[in-house]
Amino acid sequence: MDSLELISILAAAIAVSFGAIGPALAEGRAVAAAMDAIARQPEAAGVLSRTLFVGLAMIETMAIYCLVVALLVLFANPFIH
Amino acid sequence: MIRSPLSAEPLFHLGPVPVTGPVVTTWGLIAVLSIIAILATRRLALRPTRVQAIVELLVTTIADQIRETMRAEPARFLPLIGTLLIFLSAANLISLLPGFEPPTAHIETAAALAAIVFVAVHYYGICTRGFVGYLAEFAKPSWVLLPLTLLSEFTRTFSLMIRLFGNIMSGVFVVGIVLSLAGLFVPIPLMALDLLTGLVQAYIFTVLAMVFIGSAVGTAEKS
C-alpha cells in the first residue's frame, strides 16, 4: 500500500475522531441547559425541546462536516489515482 | 470496496447530458407531489372535505411558522418556503420505499436547493428595499466589514448545502456500511434514526431559508 493512501486513511480517522469531540461537548452542554430550563419551567417544555432538537441538529452538523472531509479524503482524494 | 458516496453513476444519456439516479428520483418526486397538489386543490369548497381539511391544516401550519420566524405576512413567501419544506420532507423520507435513495444524499440536489435559496434571498431583498437600498445594507454597520458580509453570503449558502447533503448522505452511508458488516435486520434502528434526521434537516433547511430571507427583507427579529 502506498504511503499516501496510508496517510489519507489515518487523516480520515483523525478528522472524524477529533471532529467528534467538540460537538459532543457542545451537545452535552446544550442538553444540560435545556434540562435545567425544563426543570425550572416545565410548562415551556414543548417549545424548549423543539428548539433543542433544531439546535442539536445544527451542532451535529459540525461533526458531519468532519465526516464529509474524511469521505473526501478517502474517496475523492485528488492526489491518489 | 464500498461505492463512493460522493459520486453517482449515470443511468442514461439525454443527448450529451448524463442523467443520474437522483435526478430521475427528483423528477418522479416533482411529478407525484404536483399531481397530489393538483388533485387535492381541484374542488375547493367552503365546507372542506377531509382531504381539503388536511391540506388547509398543512398550509396554515407553514404560514404560522413563517409569521413566527420572519415577523412578516407569509403570503409572499409561502409558495417557496412551503415547497421547500414539502419537497425536502418527501425527498428525505423516500428511503422508506424500498429501492429508492434520497436524492438529497447527493451533493448536486443539495447544491441546487441551496442555489435556489441564495437567489431567493437576493430577489426578495431587492424587491423589498430597492436595488441601492439592498446593496447599502451590506456596508452596515461599517464599510470596513464589507468583504466579510459579502463572504458570509457565500459561506452560509455553502454550509446550507453541506449541512443537508452531509446529514442525509451520512445516514445512507452508515446504513450501507452496517448492512455490509452485520446483516439484514441490524440497521433498522439506524434507519429509524435517519427518518428523524431527515425530517429535522428538512425543517432546519426551511427555517434557515426563512431566517436568511427574513434578514434580507429586514423584518426578522433581531436576536
Image (cartoon, coloured by chain):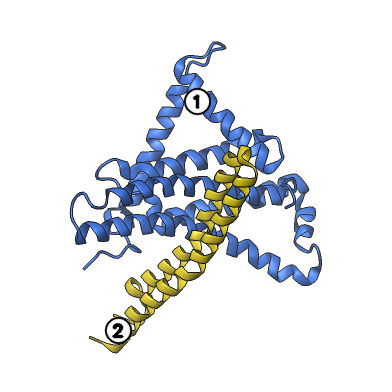
Chain colours: A yellow, B blue
Chain under callout 1: B
Q: Which chain carries label 2?
A: A
Rendered location of residue B94, percent (x, y)? 35, 42
Q: Position of residue A35 (x, y in %)?
A: 57, 50
Residue sitting farthest toward the front: A39
Residue B141, above or below A35: below
Residue at the disc numbered 1: B55
Give whichever of B145, A29 is nearer the camera.
A29
The crowd level at tag 1 (other Cα within 10 Å; few <14, some 14-19, many 20+) is: some
Residue toward you, A30 or B73: A30
Classify the position of the C terminus of chain A by image quarter.
bottom left
Give the quadrant of residue B171.
bottom left
Q: Which amino acid does label 2 sit on?
A: Leu
Percent x, y of residue B53: 50, 20
Q: Which residue is at 34% across, 51% downward?
A: B22
Q: Which residue is drawn at 40% across and 29% down?
A: B35
Q: Is residue A32 shown to the viewer in this render?
A: yes
Query: Which residue is more in the foreground, B133 or B59?
Result: B59
How busy is the neighbourhood of tag 2: few (under 14 within 10 Å), some, or many (20 plus)? few
Look at the numbered disc 2 and give the secondary structure of its residue.
Answer: helix
Which numbered tag is attached to residue A67?
none
Q: Name the residue under label 2.
A: A6
Q: Whole-Å distance between the Cαs marked 2 and 1?
A: 54 Å
Q: Do labels 2 and 1 share a chain?
A: no
